[in-house]
């Protein structure tokens, strides 16, 4: 790939910079994928734990004959279920905001790097043009 960029008129350093930025972007995408997979695993584990707890509670409920106790337990489960839903929504929103902030920061860094490369390419092309004009006058 570096030779292909060099063959297109880019200097070796510029081609290396472009390749480095491409590699950085690939690594960022890998990190993002890893974070998403980890988050999905956490959510699945939490869902499984909640399902197991609910199954346990259901078994306890079906084996219990104290109806008054069951009403209190049912209410407690409903409240806890609502709390868990709110906590999950908050957690997902927070993680989304964190991830968005990290991606925004990285995108800004990449944009600055690409602008610097664009400027360097422009200066290189301009100096090569001036050199070519000077050579043609000689």
Image (cartoon, helix red, strand yellow):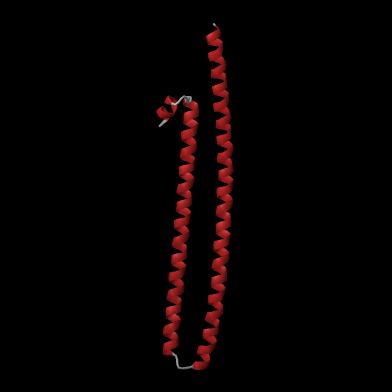
Q: Quadrant of the N terminus?
A: top left
**Residue 54 sits in which quadrant?**
bottom left
At 57% from the left and 55% from the top, the residue drawn is 98
Front residue of this view, candidates 82 and 4 = 4
Question: In x, y percent, where is residue 15?
Answer: 47, 29
- Give the side of residue 27 with respect to residue 107, left or right: left
At 44% from the left and 26% from the top, the residue drawn is 8
Question: In x, y percent, where is residue 108?
Answer: 59, 43
Front residue of this view, candidates 126 and 42 = 126
Question: In x, y percent, where is residue 69?
Answer: 52, 90
Front residue of this view, candidates 59 and 122 = 122
Question: In x, y percent, where is residue 93?
Answer: 57, 61
Q: Quadrant of the C terminus?
A: top right
55 up-or-down from 45: above or below: below
**Residue 55 sits in which quadrant?**
bottom left
26 up-or-down from 51: above or below: above
At 56% from the left and 44% from the top, the residue drawn is 107
Total marks shown come to: 0
At 53% from the left and 14% from the top, the residue drawn is 132
């Amino acid at each position: 790939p570096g030779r292909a960029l060099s063959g297109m008129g880019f200097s070796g350093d510029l081609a290396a910079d472009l390749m480095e930025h491409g590699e950085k972007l690939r690594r960022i995408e890998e990190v993002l994928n890893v974070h998403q997979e980890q988050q999905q695993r956490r959510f699945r584990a939490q869902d499984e734990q909640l399902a197991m707890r609910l199954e346990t509670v259901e078994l306890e409920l079906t084996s219990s004959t104290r109806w008054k106790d069951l009403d209190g337990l049912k209410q407690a489960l409903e409240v806890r279920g609502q709390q868990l839903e709110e906590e999950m929504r908050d957690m997902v929103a927070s993680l989304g905001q964190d991830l968005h902030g990290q991606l925004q920061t990285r995108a800004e860094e990449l944009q600055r790097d690409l602008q610097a490369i664009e400027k360097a390419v422009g200066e290189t092309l301009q100096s090569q043009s001036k050199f070519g004009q000077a050579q043609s006058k000689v």
